[in-house]
Image (tube, helix red, strand yellow):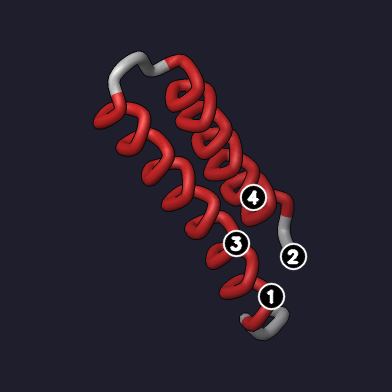
Amino acid sequence: MSQAKISQAKILREKAEMFERRAENATDPISKQHYKEMAAHYRSLAAEHLDVRRDEPAH
């Protein structure tokens, strides 16, 4: 797996962490839920990104 592919997954994980922090600091329930959903979405993208890259043939 190339460094660029790992870096992309890392960026997605960092965005997930950012949304988790926003959820923790949100004062209203709607914003809190929205940020939690966004964090889950980015965690899923990061995992999917790594899975897809792992399945690709080596060049």
Residue that badge 2 annotates: 1
Amino acid marked by disc 3: Ala
Residue carrying label 1: 54
Q: Amino acid at mark 4?
A: Ala
Which of the numbered marks, if any, corresponds to residue 47? 3
Are the residues at dot 1 and dot 2 in contact (C-beta closer than 8 Å)? Answer: yes
3D distance between C-alphas at marks 1 and 4: 13 Å
According to the picture, the residue beneath numbered tag 4 turns out to be 4
Q: Mark 2, mark 3: which one is toward the viewer? A: 3
Residue 3 location, x and y as percent? Answer: 72, 51
Between 47 and 34, the residue placed more toward the observer is 34
Q: Give the mark nearer the N terminus: 3 vs 1.
A: 3
Question: Among all residues in the image, which is located at the extreme front?
Answer: 29
Gap in angstroms between the C-alphas marked 2 and 3: 14 Å
Picture quarter containing residue 57?
bottom right
Nearer-N-terminus badge (1/4) = 4
Relative image position of residue 2 (x, y in whole percent): 72, 59
Question: Of label 2 and label 3, which has the lower sequence position?
Answer: 2
Count of marks overlaid on the render = 4
